[in-house]
Image: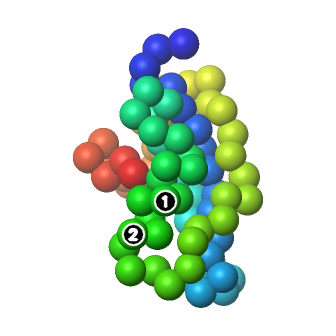
Amino acid sequence: MTDDYGYVYCMINNSMPNLCKIGCVIKSKRTSHTRANELYTTGVPEEFIIVLGVDVNVPVLDAKSKLNPIALPDEIS
């Protein structure tokens, strides 16, 4: 596995009912839990809860393009 493989995640936040955040992170840089903690520092009143986290066997950029076909590489979060 190379450095650009990672995790696809789905997170929810009780302060934002009926919404979920779907994204991916590169394994060598951070985990889904790290990303959840990063989001909590953005002024959101409650922590994000990871409801799904999946190892992906394709590069994160490929996974991200399947989740959001208009995402640009510098938008990877």
The colour scheme used here is rainbow
Q: Quadrant of residue 12?
A: bottom right
Crowd class of label 1 (few under 14; some 14 to 19; many from 20; radius 10 Å): some
Q: On the picture, is 12 further left or further right than 23?
A: right
* Location of residue 58 with respect to 72 vertically, above or below: above
Q: Is residue 73 left or right of residue 34?
A: left
Which residue occupies 49% across, 30% down?
27
- Do residues under tags 2 and 1 come within 8 Å of each other at their CB atoms? yes
Label 2, label 1: how far apart the Cα atoms are = 7 Å
- Residue behind mark 2: 41
Q: Position of residue 50 (x, y in %)?
A: 67, 58
Residue at the location (73% across, 59% down)?
51
Q: Residue at x 62, y 31 (%)?
A: 56
**Residue named by callout 1:** 37
In which quarter of the view is residue 29 placed? top left
Q: Considering depth in this image, is 9 or 40 the residue closer to the camera?
A: 40
**Few, some or many residues within 10 Å of mark 2 (<14, 14–19, 20+):** few
Is 21 left, or right, of 35 in this rendering? right
Which three-letter amino acid code belongs to the residue tagged 2? Thr
SS at mark 1 in the image:
helix
> Visible in this render: residue 69?
yes
